[in-house]
Image (tube, rainbow, N blue to C red):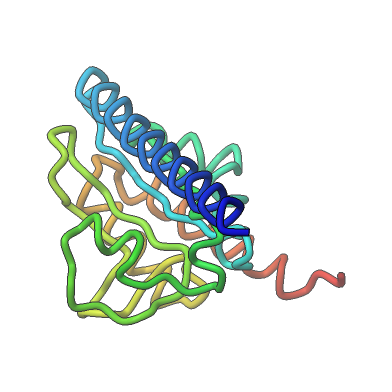
Amino acid sequence: MQKLTYFLFFVLIINFSYAQKNTTQTLDEALVKAKKENKHVFINYLNLSSKLSQKMKQQMKNEHFQSLISSNYIVVNINVNEEEASEYFTCSNPMKSMSNDNCEAMKFPFWYILDSDGNHIGTSIKDGNNNIGYPTTKEAINDFVQVIQNTSDLKADKLSLITDSFNKMNAEKLYSVK
């Protein structure tokens, strides 16, 4: 029994180290690509058990939305494993990467934007601990678009397309029957 416990612990450590290494490697590759293409990096932390994370992932795959975002950002989606077993993240995951020791549990998704040198220039956190995440309200959509406006060269017409895309997806989900 003790050997089995040690073995399982060893496997867990290996898996965690491998995932951490892959995330770091992916971010490093994105920063290199961003510098080469004169773009920023949009890092999107998702938990697949979160419905809002599912919506954000779907939004990021939307052809029109994706073309607008990819014109200014290298997008990196990071699927947070079951260590975060709920729809909430805590200091143990994305916030720790921003050296934020004073945080409360917030809903997924969580995202932030880095310049090509790796400096934080935008985040889904507004007013301390209010997470925009996947914007479901008019105010949250406006906040999302404001961050994009401040960290990109997208003009008003393109920003309004982002707003329209969120409004459309939110309306579709509101009226869909499943």
- Residue 36 at x, y percent in the picture: 23, 18
Residue 145 locus on image (x, y percent): 35, 59
- Locate the C terminus by quadrant: bottom right
Along the line of sight, the residue nearer the viewer: 14 or 176: 14
Q: Which residue is drawn at 26% across and 74% down?
A: 126
Image mark count:
0
Question: Horizontally, is 114 left or right of 107 in the view?
Answer: left
Residue extending farthest top: 36
Q: Quadrant of the N terminus?
A: bottom right
In the drawing, does residue 88 fall left or right of residue 169? left
Image quadrant in which you'd find residue 140: bottom left
Seen in the picture, residue 152 relative to 50 is either above or below; the reply is above
Q: Name the residue located 36 percent from the left edge and 72 percent from the top edge.
A: 90
Query: What's the residue at 37%, 42% (across, down)?
Result: 20
Residue at the far front: name it.
2
Residue at x-position 71% and y-position 68%: 173
Residue 134 in the image: state x and y as whole percent.
48, 65
Camera-side residue of 123 and 155: 123
Q: Where is residue 58 in the image (x, y as percent from the top left)?
A: 62, 50
Q: Is residue 104 above or below residue 112?
A: below
